[in-house]
Image (spheres, helix red, strand yellow):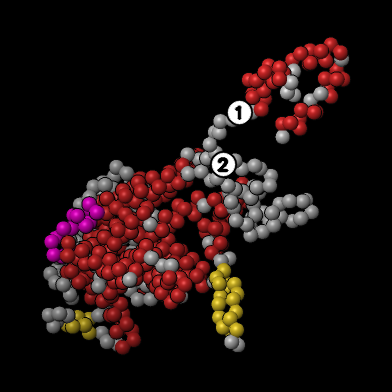
Amino acid sequence: MYNAGKIITGLVIFVVIFTLPLWWQVGKAAPPAPKPELPKTAKVCVEDTAYMRTSHMQLLNDWRNAVVRDQDRVYVGKDGKKYSMSLTNDCMACHNDKKKFCDQCHNYLAVAPYCWDCHLTPEQVKESK
Amino acid sequence: MHVIFSLLAVIVLIAIAYAGVAGAGMTYLFGVVIPYAAVITFFLGLILKVLKWGRSAVPFNIPTTCGQQKSLPWIKPNSVDNPTSTGGVLARMFFEVLTMRSLFRNTKLDYRVAHGQPVIRQGSEKFLWLFAILFHYSFLVVLLWHLRFFMEPVPKLVGVIEALDGFFEFGLPQLLLSGVILVAMAGALLDRRLRMPNIRYISLTSDYFPLFLIMGIGITGILMRYLLRVDITAIKELTMSLAVMKPVIPQAPIDPLFYAHIFLVSVLFAYFPFSKLMHMPGVFMSPTRNLTTNSREVRHVNPWNYPVKTHTYDEYEEDFRDLMIEAGLPVEHNPAEEAAAAEGGGEAAEAEPEAPEEKKE
């Protein structure tokens, strides 16, 4: 082989960079899957679980647009029940602990939603009063 | 033909993953076995191929140059485009790998008819460079923020990249520009292949297939993120279990679209070492880029040169000297004459070698 030193060095660098996720956490167990704590008071959300797991952020985005742009504050769920479109007052009335619910999955997936740039959690509301 | 075959191949691959997961429920095969096999193929195939390349010699000093070579002290050399030192070569490789400099300087033959006269010119082809560099860098960014599925805790830098990528905060989840640019640029490169007759003429299945494959990966990814929506918490459970080598299929159901995406990625990984995509390691090993342009200073010996068995005139004379002297033939070294000259003084002996010199040639 010609220029073996350079070629093998290059290959080693390539393998080290491309296997980063493997050696970064070698020997570790897979981190526990997030377990968002479900509210004890209510059994049903505005939509079914599968939809909420995948698409809650789109729902909230639509709510935001409806409230802010069209002054429409009433959301009709699948079962025909009416809900007030409000993150702090409605969603967080049941899911009242951001750390135990929202942050569980968001931190796991390194998602930093900008909800909290404006909205307050129930605790912050209490503190401010 | 090449186009349709490649497109159909990608569609069939997606259908296989859909049928395998949604129809036959083979989540372990598509979620664990195939991705692992593909990644192993990728690393082994790439390393073996690079080592194979390493075994082939570079018979000539063949760097291509785009600047003045170092020659007389009063002529200014171009030390990056025509490097004579290792530092210069490193600079040239830096610009080649990170800015695709040789593609930037690429020209294309421009033929058109003006005023009834055919005109042939060398035109610039900057759009190819633009599409290519956007394509590659957006692909890099996409790869980097995919690390959030394979690392826990996710490194801060990944979050920063993702925040910059979603800078405009279009919609929720925020539109990541890199994914859109990646698919758009793959489309632009495909369009170029299809639209320019000379490029289309030389395009093969191996050119179209990777483009369609990457577009397929991009489109399935975009669908998962923005439109059809999948449960990414469950996906991260799967991908993290792959990363720590303890694969588990999570209990929460994952949409078959995800399996189609990961199957296309697996195909890309497995196909990589056998395809044109090997330009990734290849760019580092191209002799026209990574050799120093010192062909006038240093003799480049072909390492392939066969050790030729020679029999020089000196050896020939050694074999037949006595017979030659006996036959009266002139010889370069005549022991009897040299002995006589040594006795008679140095002058005669010094003059002597000049005459036989001609014979040698």
Q: Residue beneath label 1, please?
A: B311
Would residue A10 be counted in the magenta stretch?
no
Q: Which mark is residue B302?
A: 2
Amino acid on which disc 2 is placed: Asn
Looking at the image, tell me whether mark 2 or mark 1 is earlier in sequence order: 2
Residue ID at (56%, 53%): B288
Q: Please say if B168 is above or below B94.
A: below
Crowd rating for badge 1 (residues with CA inside 10 Å; few <14, some 14–19, many 20+): few
Residue ID at (39%, 55%): B155
Crowd rating for badge 2 (residues with CA inside 10 Å; few <14, some 14–19, many 20+): few
- Is residue A29 visible in the rendered image? The answer is yes
Q: Please say if B30 is above or below A78.
A: above
Amino acid on which disc 1 is placed: His
Location of residue A122 (image quadrant): bottom left
* First to last magenta residue range: B21-34
Q: Which mark is residue B324?
A: none
**Which quadrant, please, contains the C terminus of chain A?**
bottom left
Is B218 on the left-hand or right-hand side of B248? right
Residue ID at (35%, 76%): B171
Residue ID at (35%, 46%): B44
Local SS, label 2: loop
Of B179 and B69, nearer the camera is B69
Chain letter of mark 2 equals B
Percent across and percent down for residue B188 are: 43, 73
Foreground mark, 2 or 1, reads 1
Of A53 and A119, nearer the camera is A53
